[in-house]
Image (spheres, grey):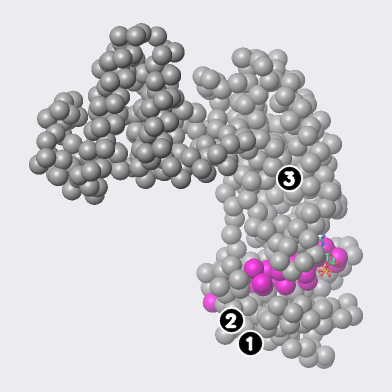
Amino acid sequence: MFDNLSRRLSTTFDRLRGRTHLTEDMLDSAFSDIRTALLEADVALPVVKQILAEIRTQAIGEKIVENVRPHEMITKIVYDSLVKMLGGDAAELDLSNKPSVILMSGLQGTGKTTTAGKLALYLRDKKNKRVLLASTDIYRPMAREQLTILGNSINIDVLDIIESEKPSEIAKRAIKVGADYDVVIIDTAGRLQIDEKLMTEIIELKKITKPDNVLLTVDAMAGQESVAVARAFHEALNITGIILTRADGDARGGAALSMRIVSGAPILFTGIGEKINDIEQFYPDRLASRILGMGDVVTLVEKAQENLDEKETERLVGRFMDGKFDLDDMLKQIKQMKRLGSLGGLLKLIPGIGKMAGELKDKVNDKTILHQEAMLLSMTPNERKNPSIIFAARKQRIARGSGTSVSDVEKLLKNFEKMQSVMKQMQSMGGMQNMMKMAQDMQKQATENGDMPPEYMLGKK
Ligand code: GDP
């Protein structure tokens, strides 16, 4: 859905590749590109202005982080702005009541009935809910039969059809019968366009059913037009959530961005096909990543910003080079690594090494590191400064204190001894290259043993 927008934005970011500093001029030209990209994606002009204002505010507030390049920084800023404009955290249906009532609204042909069925299946299979479906659409021939057939095909109960009933009577009955269910989904009549009668009827249905959720289905393919529809429905019904259908099509996607901003209601789900399970929960951050096509970079920048204490790493490497690296430093290094997030998770973010990350994670898993930390924490400061005093009784105490075994403690100490010999050799041989070569050899060996590779202790990411 967002292919074009995504392509345009990556061209913008690519232009900044290779630059080392982010200047005012660069920002201005990036903004103008982003504006064009958004307009081409069918985002409404007032919405484009809002998005750009948001990006600008973020860009001004954002400190330029060392080691982050301009194109990465801009990607991150645009990403943050998009996520914020799309509603921040993923929104959820309100299912706290028994039964929770969901009132479906929307124009005819936007996928309302299909979505009611999809939701019923989703709630049963993913949320373990007993669901009753009901249709108040007495106008469109076979509308209620369509819902019954749909319900039967997935084994979901559907309120039986009583020919003479009016929509308000059907709604009352649905609530009565629905008392035994966890969720009651009420499908309503649609129109080709918004009209008085439709609105009056659905407002009445809302009064009768007192829904916990008033959902609006909008067709992503309808573009700008659907934004006006969303606004009208929202004014009449105060909708609690939007379901964007036909997100599988090649809609330019602007509607999705505009919709949330114009109506203020969160997008809860996207319909991604005609099949009954073609429904996905909507995550603002995932969509923003997809639009930018560079979610990985964004997360890396975030991690770098939040956590990476370059100075500390430098200090630790310095201690290593001077032969002064002790178990206290090792503990600090582990803490720093932990802040960087789970090892496997971090490695997976780097494009192209996801698979390798999985393999490495099997060998050097996060648990090893946590155990190492626990053991180091169970030592006294004196023991960390002078590991040579750690004899049998102390080893036992450390193992007990950290929930590990004596042989784990011994392994850690042996690893540290190896590091010390590397430090010594390095000092005698001098030079970073030698050190790296040795570290690589050690890493190879340690990885084969399933130990933590010294690479991490050296402060390499
Ligand atoms: P209603 O009039 O709003 O109740 O719309 P329907 O539920 O009858 O759906 C109209 C058409 O849109 C049907 O052919 C559906 O299969 C199709 N449809 C609904 N949702 C989606 C979707 O997410 N993707 C695609 N490709 N088609 C959909």
Q: Kindly identify the amino acid type of the residue bearing the numbered disc 3.
A: Leu
On the question of residue 190 being in view, the answer is yes
Where is residue 244 shown, x and y percent of the image?
75, 56
**Residue segment shown in magenta:** 98-122
Where residue 299 appears, as percent x and y from the top left, is: 56, 36
How many angstroms separate mark 3 from mark 2 (CA)? 35 Å
* Residue 320, percent from left and from top: 32, 18
* Front in this rendered view, residue 207 or 392: 392
Residue at 27 percent of width and 28 percent of height: 416
Residue at which label 1 appears: 177
Choose between 100 and 234: the one closer to the eye: 100
Q: CA distance from mark 1 to mark 3?
A: 38 Å
In the figure, residue 381 lies in which quadrant?
top left
Residue 108 belongs to the span the image colors magenta: yes
**Which residue type carries mark 1?**
Val
Residue at image x 58%, y 36%?
353
Q: Is residue 202 left or right of residue 75?
A: right
Q: Secondary structure at mark 1?
A: helix
**Circle 2 residue:** 181
Say which element carries label 3. helix
Q: Position of residue 92 (x, y in %)?
A: 59, 59
- Label 2 element class: loop
What is the number of the mark on residue 257?
A: 3
Type of amino acid at the residue the image marks with label 2: Tyr
- Asked whether the beta carbons under mark 2 and mark 1 sit within 8 Å of each other, the answer is yes
